[in-house]
Image (tube, rainbow, N blue to C red):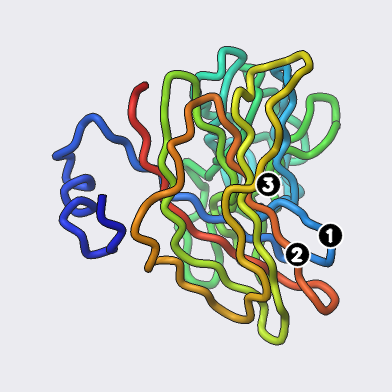
Amino acid sequence: MSYSPNSDFWVNLARGFYPEYTENHKFGTNAAVGATLVPLTGSGVYQTPTAATALEFISTSAADTAAGAGARTVVVVGLDANWAEVSQTITMNGLVAVAIPTSLLRVYRMYVATSGAYATTGAGSHVGTITVRVAGGGATWSQIVLSSAYALGQSTIGCYTVPTGKTALIFPHYLSVDAGKTGSFIFFKRENADTVAAPYSPMRIIFSLVGVAGFASLLDNATPLGPFVGPCDLITMGTVTPGTGAISIDFEIIQYTT
């Protein structure tokens, strides 16, 4: 399988010529990375419990509500108690938490589905930071953040968990680090993520780059990473020196039924 972004494979995949494959474009940014390895996500976390967890949505703005000027509905995508992908649409209630109907094991994408405002380059489709957290005001799982006060409309999660019954191939694209900083990047896998008692499969490095300054293109790789048989966690983490800075990662996932 060719890795070139101009390859006929990618064009034909987008046109639906390969129904046995599904494509998932993943990108993540962590704006406050330091000398300790952290996940490359907008929230700075990627939660990986062994039991499905009750979750809730909340915003930092009262405008993100059913009849408000901000986000009215938000979609959360992740894995349910059976490690199968599930997508749920939640009606926002601003500063009041709203329960997500189905408990989840993983959250790897969330985005604004409808908004009360016609977005412009000066104002986006939500007003506050929108957070998925453990029900009852618990730990953060994911966020749709504001970047330089502009609403992004979607989470930036550079991590993924392959659902049960699926096998994934990973095509890394790009890695970037704040100007004047040096970054290191590690891609981990955890196979058999559904094992809930010891011995567990380890978190194991599958790819790394160290000493990256500025921008690194990974498009010259001839072959994909994998295969990764679900359920399998795929987690990107990074460090920055000196001080703190941002790292961004961009990669493509091709999946097929096992």
Dot 3: what SS?
strand
45, above or below 168, in the image:
below
Q: Mark 2, mark 3: which one is toward the viewer?
A: 2
Vertical order, 177 against 154 (above or below)? below
Taking depth in this image into account, of 101 and 91 the one nearest to the observer is 101
| Image point (82%, 66%), residue name | 34
Residue linked to disc 3? 143
Say which residue appears at 33% left-offset and 30% top-offset.
256
* Quarter of the image that includes the C terminus: top left
Q: CA distance from mark 1 to mark 3?
A: 21 Å
Mark toward the start of the polypeptide (1 vs 3): 1
- Mark 1 crowd level (few <14, some 14–19, many ≥20, 10 Å Cα): few
Q: Earlier in the sequence, mark 2 or mark 1?
A: 1
Pointer 2 or 3: first along the chain? 3
Q: Residue at x 63, y 75 (%)?
A: 212
Q: Position of residue 162 (x, y in %)?
A: 50, 31
Q: Is 154 above or below relative to 106?
A: below
Name the residue beneath numbered marker 2. Answer: 239
Q: Closest to the observer: 256 or 105?
A: 256
The number of numbered badges drawn on the structure is 3
Q: On the rendered structure, is 6 left or right of 52?
A: left
Q: Say if mark 2 contacts mark 1, CB within 8 Å.
A: yes
Residue 116 locus on image (x, y percent) = 52, 48
Give the amino acid type for the residue marked by disc 2 in the picture. Thr
Q: Which residue is mark 1?
A: 36
